[in-house]
Image: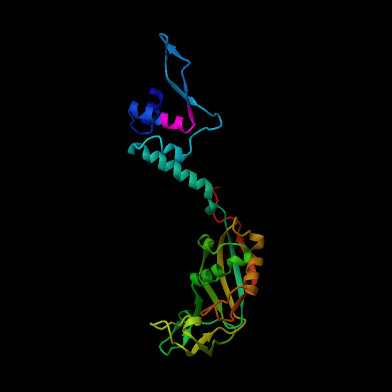
Amino acid sequence: MSEIIAKIESWGGTLTEKQVQKSAENLRMRGILSIDLSEKVNGVSIKKYKMKSIKLAIPEVAQLKDISDNPDVKPLIEELDRSKKTRKKGLKTFDYYVADVIFRTKGQVQGFVPDTEGVVRHYRNGEAVIFHSYHMRNWFRANLPLVNRASSVIGDIKFTETEVTLEGDCVVIEKYVTNIDSGFHSSHGTGGRGSRKIECLPEGSTLKTSFAIPRDLIEPGKFGNVLGIFGKFGSGFGGGAKLSTGRLVPEEVTIVTEKLFSED
């Protein structure tokens, strides 16, 4: 008993002998400890506790929570809980690789934001058309199930802004839209039917961007194939993606960094 108390104190905790006795009885009732009465002093048996199963090196965190409700032991339990979760999830951040990708546009890649005249245009940095990191993220998220990956893992993939090289001038098309299917909603959830002028990239324009991908999510050698599947079978790219014919066809995929971070 004194050894247990000493060990708890070395962790910064404080337990009384009565608390340790109660904790030991709790563990005995769970089949973890057993009572040893083999040692005697002056003919009287001394109650000792020993491990009942040699297969159990240390109780599970849930079992340790039964040992004591003393707040001084709480930091130890929280640390064991954190370590257990870390072992289950793994350290994915140490196995990222970086890929540079050049896409070529196919179909009508539509704009996102209306200008003062109501034409839905692309985002620009000065005169240059750009796509923000979340545009590529949204496209990726929608298509991940095509390659047996849950959309929820999108947070593990990192994106950058996309540079655009136009193959000619942007064109403005006129489309019939409804608030239900196209995303143009009225305040009452009805109406909104009519035509909308939308700016589209000229077909054949190139988009250059970079990705940082966990190796255990998509292997480097398969990344180009994944993008090809997205381009052929996935949802459209650009504004109004549900109705858009705009697609991205991967033209060049280069693995520029096999390991983003290394301890070496």
**Is 31 located above or below residue 250 in the figure?**
above
Residue 67 location, quadrant: top left
Q: Position of residue 25 (x, y in %)?
A: 41, 29
Residue 29 among magenta residues: yes
**Is 5 located above or below residue 102 in the figure?**
above
Asked whether 2 or 105 is in front, the reply is: 2
Tell me which residue sits at (39%, 31%) in the image: 23
Tell me which residue sits at (46%, 14%) in the image: 39
Q: Position of residue 32 (x, y in %)?
A: 49, 31
The total number of labels drawn is 0
Asked whether 18 or 91 is in front, the reply is: 18
Q: Which residues are magenta?
A: 25-33
Which residue extends farthest front? 29
**Is 109 located above or below residue 229 in the figure?**
below
Q: Position of residue 47 (x, y in %)?
A: 42, 19
Tell me which residue sits at (44%, 87%) in the image: 192
Residue 99 in the figure: left or right of residue 119 = right
Q: Position of residue 28 (x, y in %)?
A: 45, 29
Residue 43 among magenta residues: no
Residue 4 in the figure: left or right of residue 161 = left
Residue 220 in the figure: left or right of residue 47 = right
Q: Quadrant of the N terminus?
A: top left
**Is 86 located above or below residue 167 in the figure?**
above
Residue 100 location, quadrant: bottom right
Question: What scheme was used to colour the molecule?
Answer: rainbow
Which residue extends farthest top? 42
